[in-house]
Image (tube, grey):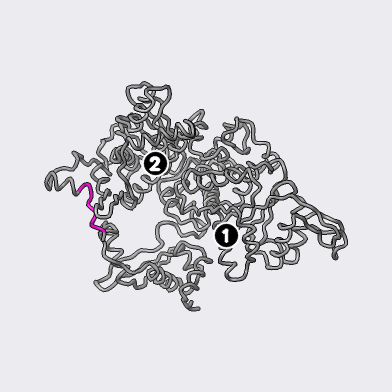
Amino acid sequence: MPRRRVSLADLHRTAVGQGQALLGTVPAPAPRALGGFDTHGISQHTHPTVADISECLFFSPGDGRIWLQDQRMILLHSEALGSLRRELIDSIGLDKARGLLTRAGYVSGARDARLVRQQWPDAEPTAAAMAGTRLHALEGVVQVEVVHARYNAELGDYDGEFIWHNSSEDDEHIAAYGVGGSPACWMQVGYATGYVSTLFGRMIVFREVECRSSGAAHCRVIGKSAERWDDPEQDLFYLNAQDFVGTPPAALADKLLGKAGRTTYLGVPPGKAPASAATHNTQEPAAHTTMVGASSAFNAACHMLQRVAPTAATVLFTGESGVGKEMFASMLHRISPRSSQPFVAINCAAIPETLVESELFGVERGAYTGAGTSRPGRFERAHGGTLFLDEIGTLSLVAQGKLLRALQEGEVERVGGTRTVRVDVRLVAATNVDLRQAVREGTFREDLFYRLNVFPIHLPPLRERRDDIPLLMSHFLAHYQRKHQRQVPGFSQAAVKAMFHYPFPGNIRELQNLIERAVILATDGEPIEPHHLFAGGEQSCGGVMSLHLQGNSGGTLHVQGVAGVGAAVQAPPAAVAASVRSSAGLTPAASPVVAPLHQAEEQMLRQALQSAGGNVALAGRLLGISRATMAYRVRKFGIEVER
């Protein structure tokens, strides 16, 4: 049975006696500066202080776990990390090792920024920014001295300079390789980039300009908004798991290629795109052709893509609608040996049942009324290249059988034709439904499923790769500013907070649409606010569902609708207990047993439906999920909808 967690602050109070100031910190108010800040002359003891942050650190010795709020942490010997670092450098090379460690640091910084946002949602920008330096020190990585840091919310501009003391990375790098000629605090640079970029919702690049590993007396790092650097591409290169991942801020496309609207390919000399780009709609906007991300889930998918690209294997992309399956399929073609041949895409859900065969296999003249000329089908047009079948789960069983034969035989026969045509096609398919479940239900052929499921790649939803949100926000903001000729400096702190709490049922496609809408609605020279983003009826972060105590026997669940209309229903005591624990700051290990998850889920569904008057779509919006997901869960629990 897990024991109660003990916070570092409690341990310290026990040791020094109650009433003594914790870690020598003295609270001081942080100033307001129109959503921005300037640390010149600011006390180093603004909240959240080290004392505040240490309240989030819990030890659970009984079950071998340490927690920083809801994130599990570990104590690791610095020498062990140094040994891993050395083995990475010696086995895969300095550049690849640097990239791995930079990305690991970025994820750590992004997670800490999310912790600060959740734990101190109303913290001033100065205090939130300072919290990152204190977390880095509390985690035993480095002591940070702030030289200066400024953030202008109206211009979306960041500029900071810091001195790092006692860098753990330097200690281990110097022990292994001695003093060299280049900086070595790779994880720490990644952490700073991830923390500040996530905190302010735009790409802010940090660069180490002095380092003990290169002979300096101390480490000095400078952080600036990406567009303020003359040559940020090298810094951003290390955030990308593969060369085909694009530079995060699309505003850099003009700088790197010298021409607006062209696609940026990182790892390719400026001004020169891959040969395959010419065969894949080079006029397409950069927002639709550049892959952006640095999260572990995104990088894992990119590694899988790179692994399978040189082969001829069939690839099946799975994931929710809007996660970028077609973009991954297009990139698979670009980095494959077939890149100079056609890439043909077709949405199976958009083809009428009567036209599936002619679309896929072609038609001969006179085959049916209206067939005045012969034309090749998608298989023939993709000969030598790649055929992408999107939403393949929507094909009928008859169409599935015809597709299976074409894949098995490697040949097609046009409708009304008398001869077969050999085709050499790499098939790539995508689906947002569970094909295994469809096979069990008899709506998808088992033999076709196994033919397609040679190399599956699952693309995670955006809510599982929130570390990528600041990169995507910067990317789409710059793209739509250029497209619509607007001058929007960035996002307000309220807008950043809303974006990080929004569930994104439409995934990256929805994020892209929200930002395009906001760029159009916002006034030039003023930052984007939440009402610019969520002007289309979406349920923003501020009011999905909340519990309020009401007596000792139960509670009230308050549901705030998208139009601002609230409703209240009774919540069970178990839900009230969860609310009490949350408001009291109790941790899961210290909490009493609550109701099973499926019971809580069913209760929440029923309450949402009651609040929405039986309207399934509205109930789904109240819960931050799509209508289809809501309808599925209602059927799953056998809930009768009142009409």
Number of numbered discs: 2
- The magenta segment: 2-9
Q: Secondary structure at mark 2?
A: helix
The amino acid type of the residue labelled 2 equals Tyr
Q: Secondary structure at mark 1?
A: loop
Residue 6 highlighted magenta (yes or no):
yes
To which residue does mark 2 refer? 195
Q: CA distance from mark 2 to mark 1?
A: 32 Å
Q: Residue at the location (38% across, 41% down)?
A: 34
CB under 8 Å between callouts 2 and 1?
no
Say which of 571 and 380 sits in front: 380
Residue indicated by mark 1: 432
N-terminal-most mark, 2 or 1: 2
Q: Nearer the viewer, residue 381 or 456?
A: 456
Q: Residue at x 30, y 41 (%)?
A: 139
Mark closer to the observer (2, 1): 1
Magenta-span inclusion, residue 513 = no
Residue 75 point in image, percent of width and height: 30, 43
From the top left corner, tell me how far across and down residue 230 is, in percent: 51, 28
- 365, above or below 47, in the image: below
Is 416 displayed left or right of 252 in the figure? right
Res 111 label: none
> Where does the image place residue 282, in percent across and percent down from the top left?
67, 40
Residue 378, by quadrant, is bottom right
Residue nearer the viewer, 551 or 633: 633
**Residue depicted at 21% across the width and 47% down the height:** 9
Q: Position of residue 429 (x, y in %)?
A: 64, 55
